[in-house]
Image (tube, helix red, strand yellow):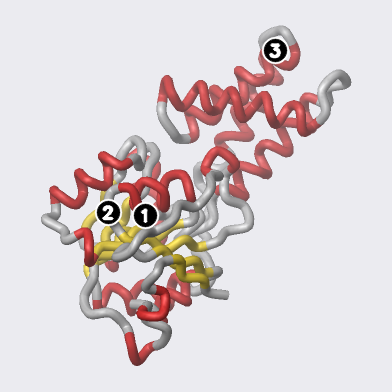
Amino acid sequence: MDRTHSPQASNAPRNSHSRRSEQTLLVDADDTLWENNIYFERAIASFISLLDHKAHSPQGIRAILNACEHETIQLTGYGLASFEKSLLRCFERVSGHHPNDVQALQIRGFARSIADREIELLPGVAETLPALAERHTVILMTKGNPEEQLHKLERSGIKEHFNAVEVPAEKHVDAYRHVVQKYSLDPAETWMIGNSPKSDIRPAIAAGLHAVYIHHPHTWVLEHDLLPTAEAPQLLIEIDDFSTLRHYF
């Protein structure tokens, strides 16, 4: 299912015979190239089971954890250390006391269990990314902890297909403008591709780029947002899987 939002939708490339000439493709990593949030969701489910709280429902605990994550990110940024701090903070808020040594060890284990998981590429990535890289300039642009993100890229087996890698602390409008300036990109020939309305799509469109929104069933709740409207000559395309990119690029 493909959806193109723009007054120029009828002019958007639709098949392999009408692919665009060389473009610059900024590509998100987590939950665009490989699975990520599902591992956090499993860790959170284990954490909620550990609490087994009588006064708060699982949904209530999750809401508290979301608030804790938002606060922690503002202080220490993204990454597993930040996630671990959020779990510990949530435990204290829900329980009214610090975890004991055994509980703290369990909570830290939930976070650390994510660290060395094998990178699971999403369907179509292994076949599609090399084809895109043959025809276009491809830059990985993913926010988070640089060391962790680069480590995942090294383990992914797809590093060779990127011309450059950018790991900003946040993907806001200025981050996109910085990349455009750094690589002397033409916004009219530059696309951001990702699964997050908040970090991939809205700020990229605001920075004057085109965007491709790839649906993912488990996008992190803190990345949810409404999709923007792309005014001509910008284009915003919605697709359901990475392999569909070959019809456009």
According to the picture, the residue beneath numbered tag 1 turns out to be: 153
Disc 1 and disc 2 in contact, CB within 8 angstroms: no
* Identity, as a three-letter code, of the amino acid under mark 2: Gly
- The percent position of residue 158, horizontal first and vertical second, equals 36, 65
What's the residue at 36%, 48% (across, down)? 142
Residue 100, which numbered label? 3
As displayed, is residue 33 above or below residue 60? below
Q: Nearer the viewer, mark 3 or mark 1?
A: 1
What's the residue at 43%, 73% (across, down)? 126
Give the alpha-carbon distance from disc 3 to disc 2, as whole Å.
51 Å
Outermost residue on the top side: it is 97
Q: Quadrant of the N terminus?
A: bottom right
Residue 208, which numbered label? 2
Secondary structure of the residue carrying numbered label 3: loop
As displayed, is residue 204 above or below residue 163? above
Q: Is residue 245 left or right of residue 87?
A: left
Outermost residue on the bottom side: it is 17
* Identity, as a three-letter code, of the amino acid under mark 1: Leu
Secondary structure of the residue carrying numbered label 2: loop
Q: Nearer the viewer, residue 242 or 87?
A: 242
Give the alpha-carbon distance from disc 3 to disc 1, as whole Å.
36 Å
As displayed, is residue 171 above or below residue 100? below
Q: Nearer the viewer, residue 200 or 226?
A: 226
